[in-house]
Every structure is written in structure tokens, then in C-alpha cells.
Image (cartoon, grey):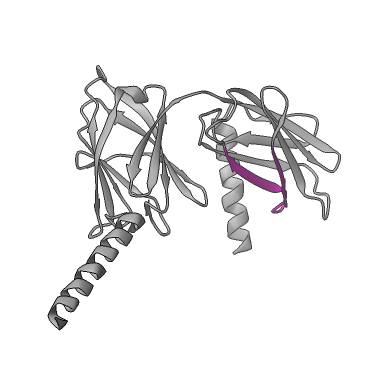
Amino acid sequence: MRQYVTILLFSTLIIFVLNNADAETGSGGIIATTNKATFQPGDKVIITGSVAKIVTNNPVTIIVRNPISNVYEVGQVNLLNNLFVHDFVLSDDVTVGTYNVQIKHGTQTGQLTFVVYGSQMQLIKVGDYNIKVRGNNTNLINYNDVSVSTIDDSLTISVNANAISSGSVTQEFQIPKAIIDTLGGSLIVKIDGKVLQCVQTETTTDRILDCMIPSSTKELTIIGTTVIPEFGSIAVLILAVGIFSTIFLSNKMKIR
């Protein structure tokens, strides 16, 4: 099992390095990269790398500084053989600009940068929760009625994308797992009944989907293995109180 995890992690590192021109290697002995070169608020940043020489009982220290050089994130991770991975999620109010990542293991050092761009955001309310939608052209798409199906564990959102002249617009959906989730896999996304391939990542609390929404879109469906009930917790409480009151009054009238 340990050997399998090592091979998987090493393969992931190689793919990241080949696909990301911002990966930096120096004479410091550490090579590292991020899962993307550019990010938006709410994105998950994954830093993956390797060290040339393992220092026993010494974790890898990662310090991320924002564009004004303030410390934004600090992490200490243990090595798996000579590989390391650290991730974190950018907050909604993250500062826009270039971030510098400094990495140290013993006397070995490395650094890299990534860029955070600003984006527009709108909220899709589902029960007591909100789906956050971000993108540079989010205002071109209106997300309207939401319906929930507990039969097939799906969420369907009506969409008006008429403002898009042609082509597609990239949208990032940050979906709380309390709304919809899937066990041991990815969410299924459909546009007007056809499966849409989206880049998916997750945190402990959210699923993050990066999708290209076509201009002709009328309906967005997300399918998982668990979904929030159609009534929110407050609505359920009010409904329960109403039912209880009705039963109580009915019994009281019978007694009379």
C-alpha cells in the first residue's frame, strides 16, 4: 500500500511539473509547483514538490506571502520518501496579485509564485446554504429556480445564459458538501441533460467545480450520492411545529 501511494504521488508530481511552467528548481535542492498558475478566491491551492536530500525527522516548511509580503499561509508537512504535498483554500477576501511561496527542508530551499485574480461572485441559495459562483463573466449568467430530488440525489438549477453572445463562459461553483456530495468519486454535472466534464477539487467542507457553461444553457444538473432535503432545517422545524399543533388541537376538540 505504501509503495502504491508513493508511486501515485510521484506520478502526480511529474504531471504537475510538466504542465506548469511556474515550477521552479534552483540550486537549493527543492523542486515544487502548484496545481495551477493562476487562481481565484475560493480556489484550492495544491503545492507539490520533492527534496534532493532527506533530513531525518525534519518536516518541510512552507510559507506563503501575499502581494504586500504579509504571511498568508504556513504549513509543515512530512515527507513521503522525498515527496511532499500541502494544500489550502483561498478565502473570499483574498488579496489580488502575485503570491510568493518559500519552501525549506534542512538547509535546502526552494521558491515559486502564483497569481490570484479577482472575480465576480453571485450566490445560489439552497435551503440554509449558498452555492458560490465565481468567474470573470459571472454577470452574464443568471441562476434562478433550484429544485432538489432525493430520489436520484440531484440538484437542478434553471439557467439564463442569453447574455453570452457565443461560445462558453468559465464558471467556478463552490458547493457546500451539506448541499450535495458523493462518496468515493466525483459529482456528475449535466447541461440540458448532457454530461459536462468539469475540473473538480474538494476541501473538507466544499466541492469546487470549474465548468465551461455554453451560451445555450437552460438547465444545470448536479448529481451526487447524498443531497440536502428539499426543505431546509428551519422550514422542517416550522413544518414539524405546524403538524404537532394541528394534531394537538384536533385531539383537544375530540375530547370536548
Query: Horizontally, is 101 left or right of 256 in the view?
Result: right
Foreground pick, 211 / 105: 211
Residue 36 to residue 240: above or below = above
Residue at 26 percent of width and 20 percent of height: 164
Q: Main secondary structure of the magenta part?
A: strand
135 vs 253, nearest the viewer: 253
Position of the C terminus by quadrant:
bottom left
Q: Residue at x 34, y 42 (%)?
A: 125
User: Does the stretch in magenta take in 23?
Assistant: no
Q: Is residue 59 left or right of residue 112?
A: right
Name the foreground residue: 102 vs 162: 162
Q: Residue furthest top?
A: 165
How many numbered marks have been drawn onto this rendered protein structure? 0
How far across and down, in percent of the image, does residue 105 sit?
A: 80, 43
The stretch of residues the image draws in magenta is 73-89
Left or right of residue 120, residue 219 in this image:
left
Q: Position of residue 148 (x, y in %)?
A: 25, 51
Q: Residue at x 56, y 28 (%)?
A: 37
Residue ranking furthest to the front: 256
Residue 165 vs residue 35, the one in the foreground = 165
Residue 104 percent location from the top left of the image: 79, 39
In the rendered image, which quarter contains the N terminus? bottom right
Residue 135, picture quadrant: top left
The reply to whether the magenta stretch includes residue 79 is yes
Where residue 165 sits: x, y (%)?
A: 25, 16
Look at the picture and state if 89 lies above or below 166: below
Q: Residue furthest bottom?
A: 255
Left or right: 93 with respect to 48? left
